[in-house]
Image (cartoon, rainbow, N blue to C red):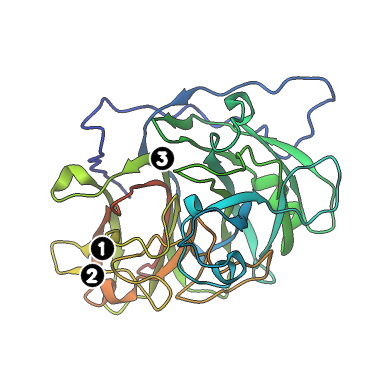
């Protein structure tokens, strides 16, 4: 089963960056006083397929943002409390401060989210993604980009280290990054329940760009009683700007699907610095050479898809602590892909367009029915 990609980013066509081989360092504690090795960083990491399988089962995820508003800094800003409940608002209008749920004095941010692996399922692959802005009212050291603390349900923190190239782009306004690690053994052990991620390397405070950051755990699983499906996980680090024409967006193509007509499916996206109420960004998908379908829903309008939400099919599908509606610069949404599969599909072409202030694209995961 093959796959292909066509990457058109805002920085122009660059030579392809080869992702380093996965090193299974995740899920193990690092001895005290030992510095974590720093993976290589790149300003732009082209989207590459990380994992794919055809199996009875599917994909689930857990996700949360690591920072939120504390008080208004702009006279036109909505009250912080209303923004957390879902009012339009952008992170640059607020002083931003860490979310903290673990009551541990040794961590400066921590959030939880529920992972719902079906009972009786076997985890076949799990990957944790985290990222954010390092420069706001303070400047965080990039040397810490490649490490976070993770606690499985009922467990203690373990230091998880990035095992692949870290996307890291500095410009006039922000210092943005995304890192990731294979955490399959940890998730097989921890399973369903509330997962906690702490020590995200993100800056707090206020600036014209604003603070943002969060984490997403993507899990592929097998279950003998579920339909045969193709699951695919892609990742990279791309800056998307506004404007017309191919150079303003990003296209990711997934081939070899062989999805029958009437198939169901879903597509998930992780993006950074998308603002609720700032229009112009969109996500569309084309099956084979057919019509283009907008991926949107009641919480993610077609012209404001990256709007700081964490939803599945337009609603919250798992418990989060905290559970803000407007996550002020962090998106982790799952969309219904079924309308694009009504006639079947051998391939899918996902097209991302940036809002007028731009945002960063980090993860795409796709689940479709497969032929028996």
Q: Earlier in the sequence, mark 2 or mark 1?
A: 1
Residue position marked by numbered label 2 in the rendering: 293
Report if residue 329 is visible in the image. no
Q: Which residue is mark 1?
A: 285
User: Measured from the top left, where is residue 100 in percent x and y?
Assistant: 75, 53
Q: Residue at x 57, y 67 (%)?
A: 79
Asked which secondary structure carries label 1, the reply is: strand
Q: Nearer the viewer, residue 245 or 260?
A: 245
Q: Which residue is rendered at x = 70% and y = 45% of the image?
A: 185
The Cα–Cα distance between marks 3 and 2, rounded to whole angstroms, is: 23 Å
Mark 1–mark 3 Cα distance, whole angstroms, equals 18 Å
- Disc 2, disc 1: CB below 8 Å? yes
Q: Secondary structure at mark 3?
A: strand
Q: Residues within 10 Å of mark 1 (few under 14, many from 20)?
A: many
Q: Residues within 10 Å of mark 3 (few under 14, many from 20)?
A: many
Query: Can you say which quadrant of the picture contains the C terminus?
Result: bottom left
Q: Nearer the viewer, residue 260 or 237?
A: 237
- Tag 2, which secondary structure? strand
Residue 339 visible in the current orientation: yes
Q: Nearer the viewer, residue 329 or 102?
A: 329
Q: Which residue does the numbered mark 3 point to in the structure image?
A: 236
**Residue 207 point in image, percent of width and height:** 50, 42
């Amino acid at each position: 089963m093959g796959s292909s990609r066509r990457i058109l980013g805002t920085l122009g066509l660059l030579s392809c960056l080869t992702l380093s081989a996965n090193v299974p360092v995740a899920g193990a504690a690092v001895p005290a006083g030992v510095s974590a090795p720093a993976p290589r960083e790149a300003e732009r990491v082209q989207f590459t397929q990380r994992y794919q399988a055809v199996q009875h089962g599917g994909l689930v995820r857990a996700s949360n943002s690591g920072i939120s508003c504390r008080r208004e800094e702009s006279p036109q800003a909505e009250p912080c409390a209303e923004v957390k409940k879902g009012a339009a608002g952008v992170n640059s209008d607020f002083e931003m401060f860490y979310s903290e749920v673990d009551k541990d004095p040794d961590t400066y941010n921590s959030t939880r989210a529920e992972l719902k692996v079906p009972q009786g399922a076997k985890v076949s692959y799990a990957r944790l993604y985290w990222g954010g802005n390092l420069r706001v009212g303070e400047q965080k050291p990039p040397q810490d980009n490649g490490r976070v603390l993770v606690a499985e349900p009922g467990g203690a923190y373990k230091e998880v280290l990035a095992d692949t190239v870290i996307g890291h782009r500095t410009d006039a306004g922000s210092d943005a990054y995304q890192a990731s690690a294979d955490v399959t053994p940890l998730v097989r052990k921890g399973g369903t329940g509330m997962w906690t991620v702490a020590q995200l390397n993100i800056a707090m405070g206020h600036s014209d760009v604003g603070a943002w950051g969060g984490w997403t755990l993507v899990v592929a699983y097998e279950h003998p009683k579920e339909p045969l499906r193709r699951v695919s996980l892609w990742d990279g680090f791309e800056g998307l700007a506004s404007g017309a024409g191919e150079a303003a967006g990003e296209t990711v193509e997934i081939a070899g699907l062989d999805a029958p007509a009437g198939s169901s499916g879903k597509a998930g996206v992780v993006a950074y610095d998308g603002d609720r109420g700032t229009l112009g960004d969109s996500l569309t998908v084309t099956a084979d050479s057919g019509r283009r379908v907008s991926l949107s829903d009641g919480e993610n309008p077609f012209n404001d898809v990256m709007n700081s939400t964490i939803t599945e099919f337009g609603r919250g599908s798992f418990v989060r602590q905290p559970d803000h509606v407007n996550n002020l610069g962090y998106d982790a949404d799952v969309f219904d892909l079924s309308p694009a599969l009504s006639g079947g599909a051998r391939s899918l072409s996902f097209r991302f367009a940036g809002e007028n202030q731009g945002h960063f694209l980090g993860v795409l995961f796709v689940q479709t029915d497969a032929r028996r």
